[in-house]
Image (cartoon, rainbow, N blue to C red):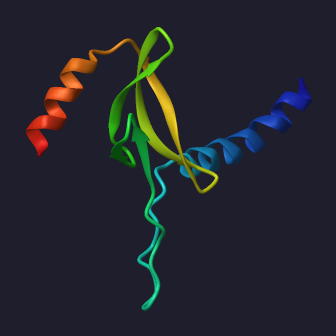
Amino acid sequence: MTRLFLLLPTLALIFPAIAIQAQQFERPEPKEGFSYPEYFCTNRGIRVDVEDQSCLIIGDRTVQAVCDISLNNPTWRVIGEGCTPTAEVLQAANKK
């Protein structure tokens, strides 16, 4: 029982630190003369910017995914099953 009372203050200090680290990271402005690399994903030959969503067709299934960065590489993160690819094509056509 005394171990639990010793552990509680430690946990109270750790959990707020974890919550602070979980906040969205915003990178600082690059120094003069430098720039950040341009990251983007591609979906069926169409460029998709980081943090934009797209409908991916993987074999016989479709998933809604978001373009993200992982270890300095662009990657897709699945956010939902199923989507309507025709809606995405119509949306892309309206942007042009």
Task: Give x and y (percent) for residue 71.
Answer: 64, 52
- 71 left or right of 52 in image: right
Quadrant in which the N terminus appears: top right
Residue 29, x across and y down, in percent: 41, 77
From this view, report whether residue 64 is shown above or below residue 37: above
Q: Residue at x 27, y 15 (%)?
A: 84
Depth check: 4 or 38 in front? 38
Instruction: Tell which of 34 and 3 is nearer to you.
Output: 34
Q: Residue at x 28, y 19 (%)?
A: 85
Query: Is 53 drawn above or below residue 26 in the view shown?
Result: above
Relative to the observer, which residue lies in front, 17 or 22?
22
Measured from the top left, where is residue 86 in percent x and y?
Answer: 21, 19
Q: How many badges with numbers are in the image?
A: 0
- Percent position of residue 63, x then y: 42, 18
Answer left or right for 34 relative to 54.
right
Classify residue 30 by image quadrant.
bottom left
Q: Splitting the image into 4 quarters, where does residue 35 fall?
A: bottom left
Question: In the picture provided, is 95 more to the left or to the right than 88?
Answer: left
Identify the residue shown where x is 42% and y is 91%.
32
Q: Residue furthest bottom?
A: 32
Q: Nearer the viewer, residue 7 or 65?
A: 65
Q: Looking at the image, is 7 positioned above or below residue 68?
A: above
At horizontal 55% and vertical 51% (from top left) the residue drawn is 20
Q: Residue furthest front?
A: 45
Q: Tell me: 73 left or right of 60.
A: right
